Image (spheres, rainbow, N blue to C red):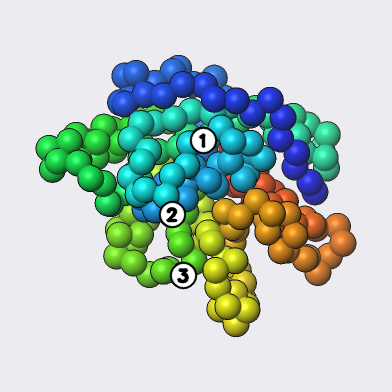
Amino acid sequence: MMITISNAHFLTSASKLSECPPPSTSEIAMLGRSNVGKSTFINTLLESNLAKSSSTPGKTRLINFFSSVWFDSASSSSIPISLIDLPGIGYAKVSKQELALWQRNLWEFLQQRRSIKVFIHLIDARHRNLPIDENLARQIQAILLGDQILLPIYTKVDKLTKNELAKLRQKGALITTNNATIAQTIYRPKSPQGPQTLLDMTRVSILRALLGSNG
């Protein structure tokens, strides 16, 4: 099974639910700490430079929508998918009042945007048990509907030692990297029919979660 992406493009930005475009396809929302690399992950996933990434935590302050078409070679089917880059959880150089407003708008969006079928929780593989991530996972689990899935994916695995990476993979964790070059070369499956790169594996895992959520 191999997934290729086409027609990836930026749709629009919104600051709150009422400003968001009406849903036209199944949606995947990216969640995580402010410095986990959500925008970079989207760019790697789509092999594009659409999402604005920054080394400054808290740079993404809007809800950003991206459109794409995923082609599944196994079934020869094309699946339109919208990806949503959300403001990071945690650090941001803003006032407490502005931060509270962001958080209120964000959780209203997450609870009421029912076209979201997969919530991808990006977690820094070097810091896997932070309270902020554990709290985020609990909050998302609490609002999930029957046709929604929370999918944790561990990023920045290229920063791990070989021993740390082996332990993470033994747990069956979904892993990825924000380094586009490494994403194309790091993964080697046991089965020749499986994904051939880490990027392939990530796309397949996401698409399977999406199709599973859609019944």
Q: Label 1's element?
A: loop
* Residue 86 quadrant: top left
- Look at 68% across and 29% down and name the residue there: 69
Of callouts 1 and 2, which one flags the residue occurring earlier in the amino acid sequence?
A: 2
Residue at 58% from the left image edge and 41% from the top image edge: 43
Amino acid of disc 1: Ala
Q: Residues within 10 Å of mark 2 (few under 14, many from 20)?
A: many
Tell me the tag on residue 36. 2
- Left or right: where 18 falls relative to 189: left
* Picture quadrant where residue 166 is located: bottom right
Residue picked out by circle 3: 126
In the figure, is residue 71 to the left or right of 84? right
Task: Indicate the secondary structure of the residue bearing disc 3.
Answer: loop
Closest to the observer, 212 or 79: 79
Q: Residue at x 34, y 62 (%)?
A: 134
Decide: is 91 above or below 169. Answer: above
Chain-order first, disc 2 or disc 3? 2
- At label 3, which amino acid type do we have? Arg
Give the labeled residue for mark 1.
51
Q: Is residue 23 above or below residue 45?
A: above
Q: Residue at x 77, y 66 (%)?
A: 188
Q: Where does residue 37 sit, x and y in percent of width and height?
A: 47, 50
x, y percent for residue 79? 69, 30
